[in-house]
Amino acid sequence: MKLELRGITKRFGALVANNNISLTVESGEIHALLGENGAGKSTLMNVLYGLYVAEEGEILLDDRVQKFAGPGDAMNAGIGMVHQHFMLVPVFTVAENVVLGHEQTTFGGRLDLSAARAKVREISDRFGFDIDPDALIEDLPVGVQQRVEIIKALSQDAKVLVFDEPTAVLTPQETDELMTIMRQLAASGTSIVFITHKLREVRAVADRITVIRLGTVVGEASPTATNAELASLMVGRAVELTVHKNAPELRGTALSVKNLSVIDVRNQIVVNNVSFDVQAGEVLAIAGVQGNGQTELTEALLGLQQHVTGSIELDGKPLRGYSVRHILDSGVGFVPEDRTEDGLIADFNIAENLMLDRSSGAPFVKAGNLQLAFRAKFAAEKITEFDIRSQGSEMEAGRLSGGNQQKVVLARELSRDLRLFVAAQPTRGLDVGSIEFVHTRIIETRDSGIPVIVVSTELDEVVALADRIAVMYRGEIVGIVPGNTPRATLGLMMAGEHAPAAEAAL
Amino acid sequence: MSTITQNSAPLPSSAPIVKPTAQVRSWKIPITFGGFAVLSLLLFVGLGRGQRGELSTFRLSEGRDLIQLPEVALPTFVTGVFVAIVLVLLAAASAWLVYRHRKIPILLTIVFALLFLVGFLAWAASGSTIPVPGLLIGTVTLSAPLIFGALGGVLSERAGVVNVAIEAQLLAGAFSSAVVASATGNPYLGLLAAMVAGALVSMVLAAFALKYLVDQVIVGVVLNVLVIGLTSFLYSQVLAPSANLNSPDVFPRLNIPLLSEIPIIGPVLFRQTIIVYVMYVAVALVFFGLFRTKWGLRVRAVGEHPQAADTVGINVNRTRFVAVTLGGVISGFGGAYFTLGAVGAFNKEMTNGMGFIALAAVIFGQWHPIKATLAALLFGFATNLQNVLGIIGSPVPSEFMLMLPYVVTIFAVAGFVGRSRAPAADGKPYIK
């Protein structure tokens, strides 16, 4: 089915999320929609899917104008969507999720789940998915959950399939498989819209590329374009894609973690007997797919987890079992993975956020009184030093862009006297410019002789920053390898293969 | 990664993930058991009630039963000592199981609870007689409004709207059923009025919660206060001066032929009023509706993940509104028990906190209609036990016995239920 968007404009108050966007996707084509976070890709697709109503413009399917009042209409017209955050009910089975909204019933209004199971099996067999219709969603790995999303869309005879940032949660291997599936679908005549900000994937799978910046189409490109060309189109200026760094100047072991295990509230072992060292002056990257224990590991380092066994020593002094206050005072700086939840208080202004973890004494507090003059001066300095684009230190942190919020967090943590720096997902959701800034800061921190741990699910980031890479899988470190290890090896390790086995498989 | 190859990469397995679970010993159950074992040693043995050979008699049949079961007479002190010793052994067994990292079978808990109950009844009834059918009949009768309230709560909360207003729905049902049944002389119209009143209360809850996005707990609390005030005002201004508006016919007990003659079960389950019979049907219908129909799948979907429901074309707020309203219909019906099923007149604040006990039953019953019904029965039993022991003259002070249903609630929720998981979107309004 041919999809055409003509002059779509969508406003949220004063913000124009989509400005006169036009786009054509031919039948059987994989059309990539490339743009940074916040460029307006998801808004456009939500308009297409009937979740938002556009102020201007029209949607055409096979040259017929469509009017969508809701997702139901879009689905009936043959549009299916694989959402970035899966739209699956975790406590329902695969079959229940697939039929939800289109249930068949038998006598007395009884739900006909056997028809649903048969449908799941049929589609699952057609694409070789091997999915048990009676498995609960919450028990399935994310890669499989995504297949359930695809089955859900296909069960409604979708002719246009939208993939919204589908690879964010996948291992490289799962990503490759997804691309094979997309090819298969396109070959069978389905039109595919592939939304992403990852250049590598676009070039691997797309037939055509449309680039969006700040809500407007800024150009089309062919998959043969180079990364640098695509990136500059996406960002609007030439971008430095590689991080410049010299060989690390190692200054001896600073952090030593031995046999660390973390048990969560449901008694599950989320970090399992993990041991590693970090030298002063190096970056140890912790790679792995989201949810393999990285979050809990960093929280354990900061004293934020309840049930931790093993030992953590920083400069020979034990940290495990001490309060967060003690650990911060020992010189541990921490960038949490969710800056809006754990890194900042959105309703506090920049100056207040900059002193959040230093409220216990001088220089910010004397005799129980906030030192406002000092704080204002401090904030002004940091805003200049870290290039925080704002209307001054009194501006609420919640009103800053993601990149500037992250700069506030970095400024706060890096302005203390650090002995260890832990950054979890430091560039998640940031624009390319901010990513450059954060990466540069992290390397500067390393070069000043501080041991750095970077946790990231983005392989690009891991490879760019790491001197050594520890790969986590299901709570364990499957191996610690040098920073120049090939991506394919890392990808296999992220799927659970141990380092030597991963090398041998290539 | 720029080329697509089906290399030797391990396929992502579609098998469910089994996360390793740490062996953490939970001493909660052995400690609870130990507490009760010590309590029984103190009460049954230490206080030495019945040492002069008194008997505790359990009467198993009512006078008008066709099949008469003999009375069971147990020697009070001997029974007490026996029960106390077995309880101590069971507590030790549970401690041993936990020490060996084994699961404590649910049967052990049930046996423990029943034994303690028998020991306690024998001790309390030293030298007198416990009417077992009476105790159980009262349990079912007293549970009826709790069960209706809990079912209403389950429906509403499964759809994602926290229903603190069960008390208000019960009270509104009680009031309007009394007035309508008295005015028309037809108690069935009273039942209808109760359902309408419950529905109206829940519609206010739904409107404020879903359309105006007001905090659902606050709306619920305000509704409770509002309905208490409104019914009390109307009672003193309208009902008290003209008694003919507050004298509805009470539903008689209907004996179901044959079934009502089964020993013990017959009188308990099948010599009840029509309200209780409707309750049996309601429990089955709510269960069937929620877990076996298309409608129920959608209700649970909007309560767990409203956005997912929205993206497949389900109208989240309409689904929630209907479920909450239906919950109000059921709770309101339960309110009619107070006037048409029991007292025969409306009194100020006559629901007396039953709505909150029903809410506890919803949570204790893990938002499941049948488990919530069992929880409500437990509370009904505790309430009626207090009544029965008051009548036969128990050694426990009556003020202390009044605490019983609430103590049971706390122990039930804290001690024996693990972490119960509410519907994921419970209490969260859906904003696109």
Image (tube, coloured by chain):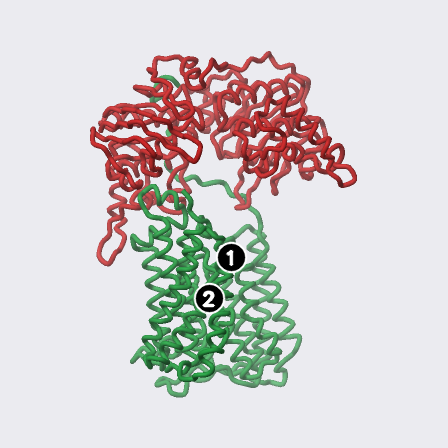
Q: Colour of chain A?
A: red
Vertical comparison of B390 with A18: above or below: below
Of residues A294 and A102, the one nearer the viewer is: A102
Label 2: state its secondary structure.
helix
Q: Is residue A415 left or right of residue A132?
A: right
Q: Chain of mark 2?
A: B
Identify the image quadrant of residue A77: top left
Query: What's the residue at 35%, 44% (across, down)?
Result: B310
Furthest residue in direction front, as rendered: A14
Residue underneath mark 1? B218
Residue ID at (54%, 76%): B386
Q: Nearer the viewer, residue A275 or A345?
A: A345
Name the N-terminal-most of marks 1 and 2: 2
Q: Is residue B87 left or right of residue B60?
A: right
Q: Which chain is green?
A: B
The x and y percentages for residue A419 are: 69, 26
Res B324 → quadrant: bottom left
Q: In the figure, is residue A55 to the left or right of A155?
A: right
| Residue B234 on image: x %, y % | 46, 75
Instruction: Answer whether residue A19 is visible to the viewer in this image.
Output: yes
Relative to A123, say whether B4 is above or below.
Answer: above
Q: Which residue is mark 2?
A: B168
Q: Which residue sits at x=46%, y=49%? A: B428
SS under mark 1: helix
